[in-house]
Image (cartoon, helix red, strand yellow):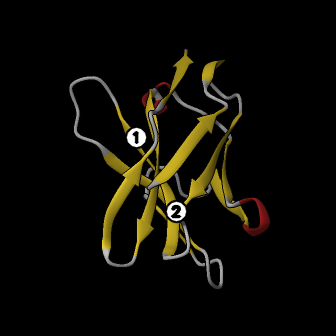
Amino acid sequence: QVQLVESGGGPVQAGGSLRLSCAASGRTATAYAMGWFRQAPGKEREHVATIRWSGGSTYYADSVQGRFTISRELRRMTIYLQMNSLKPDDTAVYYCNIKMRGHDDYWGQGTQVTVSS
């Protein structure tokens, strides 16, 4: 089993910044990437950003490119999502995701981000 613990969500005004964290623990030996997804009310869950453990390659949704930055701290099995220039459209529950070889993804419990105009 793998556990993901997220933190850092909350309310913020448009144009502001937040940083989300997600720490993985448990049987993470076969993990090869971690990332963030989000789900707004009435919408499907969508990819936000992913980072590969080996090499650190990053992938972003077009909607957040240039505003969000994903990073990792290998020793702590933790990823971060620095979110700048936040917009009301960024309001959603943000979920941490970890991708494992030979196993389904694991998901965090979600953290609410609310951006007010």
Q: Quadrant of the C terminus?
A: top right
Nearer the observer, 3 or 84:
3
Q: Position of residue 3 (x, y in %)?
A: 51, 48
Q: Residue furthest bottom?
A: 55
Question: Where is residue 64 shown, x and y percent of the image?
Answer: 51, 50
Counting from the top left corner in percent of width and height, residue 29 is at: 55, 74
Q: Residue at x 21, y 25 (%)?
A: 42
- Estimate the spatial distance between the alpha carbons at disc 1 and disc 2, rounded to whole Å: 14 Å
Q: Mark 1: which secondary structure? A: strand
Q: Residues within 10 Å of mark 2 (few under 14, many from 20)?
A: many
- From the viewer's perspective, is 94 left or right of 104? right
Which sits in the foreground, 52 or 115? 52
Q: Which residue sits at x=68%, y=41%?
A: 84
Amino acid type at circle 2 is Met
Dot 2: element: strand
Q: Which is closer to the viewer, label 1 or label 2? A: 2
Q: Residue 45's spot in the image, x, y percent?
A: 29, 42
Whether pointer 1 and pointer 2 mark residues with C-beta atoms closer than 8 Å, the reply is: no
Residue at 60 percent across and 54 percent down: it is 25
48 above or below 45? below
| 95 sits left or right of 51 in the view | left
Quadrant of the snapshot with the N terminus: bottom left
Q: Residue at x 46, y 26 (%)?
A: 91
Above or below, 34 against 44 in this view is below
Residue 14, picture quadrant: top right
Residue wearing tag 1: 38
Tag shown at residue 34:
2
Placement of 87 over or under 55, stated as above or below: above
